[in-house]
Image: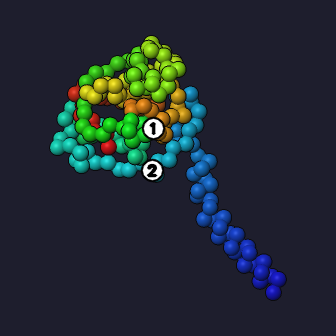
Amino acid sequence: MSSQIFSRRATLLGALATLAAPAIARAQTPDALNDAGTPTRHNVSSFVTQRWQDHFDSLGVATIVADTKSRALHYWNADGSDYRLYPTSVPRTDELTRRGYTEVVRKRVGPDWTPTASMRERDPSLPAYMPPGPGNPLGTHALYLSWPAYLIHGTHDTRKIGRRSSSGCIGLYNRMIAELFDLVPVGAQVRLI
């Protein structure tokens, strides 16, 4: 009887180890490198697949869909042959989140930053103005939208990506916003959902 108990335990433990092995292996494998070149983990399974046809009649000069729920930015070029997916930071609260249709009206390398009055009211320690540079929360590149004070921009604080951390903007790793910046022309259509 004791060998029968040992056999059942061994079988049960073996089955549990087999079921857990893929999850343990995935947890040990970094998905990407952040701006500092260190591994970061992304919960890619939380990205919701988007189709541009569900949001626009045509691709225009380029199309961006920023999904605040799955914290991902989807990009398509004018003929749909280039599709890219980027992890993002999103607004902290629904009150700070603007949803709807807009477009890229300006692009800037090395953006400067002037916090809005409401940002400074929420956090009086914010400076009135910040020039471009490593401490600037807009990172290395910015895509300005037709909505005042709403941007798609980089961030030096890589901990923000994948989180609700912004005051309304969509943030990307600096190396990813630099890539997107080169792809997206002024006039690209954008939808925040």
Q: How many marks?
A: 2
Residue appearing at x 56%, y 30% in the figure: 37
The residue wearing badge 2 is 46
Q: Nearer the viewer, mark 1 or mark 2?
A: 1
Question: How many residues crowd around disc 1 within 10 Å: few (fewer than 14), some, or many (20 or more)?
Answer: some
* Residue at (30% x, 25% y) in the render: 148
Residue 20 x %, y %? 62, 61
The answer to whether 158 is drawn above or below residue 117 in the figure is below
Nearer to me, 99 or 108 = 99
Mark 1 belongs to which amino acid? Arg
Look at 61% across and 53% down and name the residue there.
25
How far is the residue under mark 1 from the one under mark 2? 18 Å
| On-image quarter of the C terminus | top left
Choose top left, top right, bottom left or bottom right for residue 77.
top left
Q: Position of residue 69 (x, y in %)?
A: 40, 46
* Residue 39 lies in quadrant: top right
Secondary element at image label 1: loop
Residue pushed farthest front? 121
Disc 1 designates what residue? 92
Which image quarter holds the N terminus?
bottom right
Residues packed near mark 2 inside 10 Å, few (<14), some (14 to 19) or many (20 plus) = few
Task: Give the vertical position of 58 relative to 128 (above or below).
Answer: below
